Structures are given as C-alpha cells and as structure tokens.
Amino acid sequence: MTPPCSIDVLLFAGASESAGGADRVTVQTHPRPTANELMTQLAEQHTELAAMVQRSRLAVDQRYVSPDHVIETDAEVALIPPVSGG
C-alpha cells in the first residue's frame, strides 16, 4: 500500500477569501494524483472552497493544466479563481 502524501495548494483572491484569508491549504492525497482528483479532494477536504473549486482552474508550476495532468508531490500547485476584466 502506498502511503498518502500532502500537497499544498496556493490560494489567491476569492479563493483566499473563501478560506478565511488563508494563502494556502493542504490536501491529503495519494501520490501523483491527477488535477481532477486533486480538485475533488480539495473540495471534499476544504468544504469552504467547494463552490470556488467548481468555478476555478488548477495551475501546476505556473501553467494551467488539463484535468488528466498528473501532479508530482513537489510541484507548485495553485487554485486560480475566475477573473474579470479585459
């Protein structure tokens, strides 16, 4: 059995506000989750972010990724909320 791991997810703007002003949260997951799996676990483990997760995208190492992108445990992961403006 593979031991679980932790991935820190950076929060900005509305996501940070939804988490009470926190600039990051930790998600307990299995090694090498996909972006979709991490988003699901993020919403389950931090319910205050569930609505925001549905409207946001995930960036890994400063690039938007597809739902099937595999995330390494040492990657920089950020939840990017929707933005407005031109």
Image (cartoon, rainbow, N blue to C red):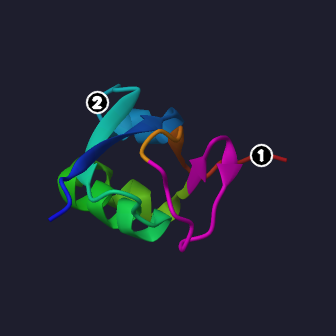
Query: Looking at this view, is 14 or 42 the one in front?
Result: 42
**Pointer 2 residue:** 20
Instruction: State the extent of the magenta-drawn residues as a range.
Output: 58-72
Q: What's the amino acid at mark 2?
A: Gly
**Is residue 59 in the magenta section?**
yes
| Frontmost residue, 14 versus 58 | 58
User: Which residue corresponds to the image point at 14% horizontal and 65% vertical from the top-left?
Assistant: 1
Note whether 62 is above or below 28 in the view shown.
above
Using the image, tell me which numbered label, if any, was put on residue 74: none
Q: Estimate the x, y position of residue 66 in percent, counting from the top left.
A: 62, 69
Residue at 55 percent of width and 54 percent of height: 58
Q: Is residue 48 magenta?
A: no
Q: Is residue 66 above or below residue 32?
A: below
**Helix, strand or loop for the magenta stretch, by majority:** loop
Left/right of residue 21 with respect to residue 13 in the rendered view: left
Give me the C-alpha separation between circle 1 and circle 2. Answer: 24 Å
Please identify the residue farthest to the bottom as the structure is shown: 68
Residue that numbered label 1 is attached to:
85
Q: Secondary structure at mark 1?
A: loop
Local crowd at mark 2 within 10 Å, few (<14), some, or many (≥20)?
few
Residue 62: quadrant of the picture: top right
The kind of residue tagged 1 is Gly
